[in-house]
Image: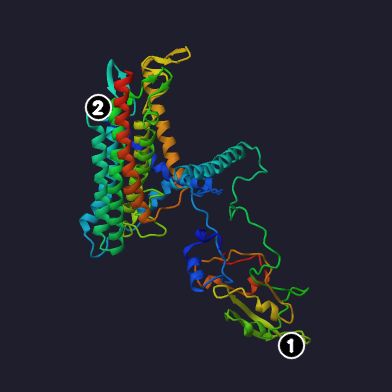
Amino acid sequence: MLVKIVLTLIVIMGALNLAGFLTWVERKQSAVIQDRIGANRARIFGLRLLGLFHPLADMIKLIMKEDFTPRLGHKTLHMLAPFISVFFALIAFAAIPIGDHLMLWGHPVSLQVSNMNVGLLYIFAVMSMGVYGVFLAGFSSNNNYSFLGGLRASSQMISYEITMGVSLIGIIMIYGSLNLQDLVQAQGHYWLSWIPQWGIFVQPVGFLLFMTAAMAETKRAPFDLPEGESEIIGYFVEYSGMKFGMFMLSDFLETVLAAALLATLFFGGWQIPYLFSDGFHFPWGGVWLIPQTGVALLGVLSFSLKIIFFCWFLMMVRWTLPRFRYDQLMRLGWKMMLPLALMNILVTGLIMVLLKEFIL
Amino acid sequence: MENDAAIGAYEYTCYRINNGFVKGIHLVNRKELTFLERIYIFEAFKGILITSTHFFKNIFLHTAHLLGFLKGQSAAVTIQYPDEKREYAPRLRTRHRLVQREDGSPRCVACMLCETVCPAKCIYIIAGEDPDPNIEKVAKKFDIDLGKCVYCGFCVEVCPEDAIRMDTQIMDIAAYSREEMLLDMDELLHPGSRKNG
């Protein structure tokens, strides 16, 4: 029980800190891409550390700012909306396995906050609940523009949720499980004891579709037109101070979540190629034995690195592609990605049947 | 018009209305997107390739700078303003100064030309008598309100005595109140000094 609480704290703190850290990464990475230097002025005792204190300074600023509620807005809902956003972004991490079993004092401890059978369904359910935060924010602000922004955001999220769900059916069909731990373990097998059976090799189309849909789901560029802070009025115009900060935070949390999902479902989760439960067994014959604790910790490390890589990649996409227009967004979602996802299921099923009939 | 299909809708309308060849209309040959370009994925990856080249090149240079190598090659185009300033052109109109004679008295003879010509009405002069019989008047007070000044340089152009110039190269003139934006004669005579700076 105590171990579970510690694990929960580790996961929550890890996600929150990574999300806070991403605000710095976003500024610095965009600066580096655009040949600038980026935020580097915040300092403590003359120490600048490449501007690493900026998230801290932002936090202090946001907390000190006036917390404003529109006069005719719905006070309770206006208060509730950012909490709903952050809450549902956070609890989705419960189903994600951060590693294999760790042996502690002779007991195996699963490195997953909650090992549920329907982990994938749970994550989808929780992510769909995020729409409520967005919509209530627009609805309770008593502002037509933020109401429209809320409508835009919720219609976008609902449209892309469908593609996101459907694009994963291929994965579920092949690995035959909704349990994320099982999915990761299934990705530890090898073809010809050489190529790992990672989701990216099994379902390349599913990967592209899921990645695009996840980007749209997290409302980041090039799908950031519900927010579009600088040009379009989004659903959180009437928010200030830390409530606004919470919307931003849930944005980054969802980025981390999307990265974690991409790593779990398509890049083998905590798996490292050729690392088995007792050490490395290379296909070219080398064997390097590692104690079980080392293997588990290496798995956690590899999962963290994969998450960081995908966070980096999602940021890279954000600073590369221009924003879609609303009609382009809907066209892409409904007319291209959904049919492609359905086709993907069909083709996957066909190939599975053919493989079973003729080869095995 | 052999490239009829390639011209855009706007150009095509003009062409139809004027019935034939029209002078003065710039035809834009828009390239049709190929299939690979239209499915966007490859183009998106090409874009990411461009941004990541910048990213990795600059990260490499930044790391090299931290370790003390490749100082000559800049990783960013940023000028970190208060720490490093770019060189201004010598003719740039910057904060004003009053030119002194050899004995240290201001050259200004309080002719009021600059106060008259100033479009922003930011110069306030009060004239007084000079003990030297060769000089008729002298400025007893000479204030410039930088909060109003539009930096047109008319005062410099109009001055018959070359008494006022705008060549101090001082650009940061911020202050916390309107009163502090007022430059008095002492500050104008000694450009480095600023009471409220």
Q: Nearer the viewer, residue B193 or A248?
A: A248
Q: Nearer the viewer, residue A3 or A147?
A: A147
The picture places residue B48, in percent across and down from the top left corner, at: 49, 43
Residue under circle 2?
A2
Q: Which mark is residue B136?
A: 1
The picture places residue B20, in percent across and down from the top left corner, at: 54, 71
Q: Which mark is residue B170?
A: none
Residue at (60%, 51%) from the top-left corner? B77
Say if residue A304 shows up in the picture.
yes
Instruction: Examine the rendered structure and indicate whether residue A293 appears above or below residue A151.
Output: above
In the image, taking residue B193 as reference, residue A247 lies left or right, namely left
The picture places residue B33, in percent across and down from the top left corner, at: 49, 50
Image-quadrant location for residue A260: top left
Instruction: Examine the rendered structure and indicate whether residue A87 appears above or below residue A112.
Output: below
Residue at (65%, 43%) from the top-left corner? B73
Q: Gap between marks 2 and 1, in whole Å?
A: 94 Å
What crowding class fits label 1: few (fewer than 14 Cα within 10 Å), some (14-19), or many (20 or more)? few
Q: Nearer the viewer, residue A312 or B8?
A: B8
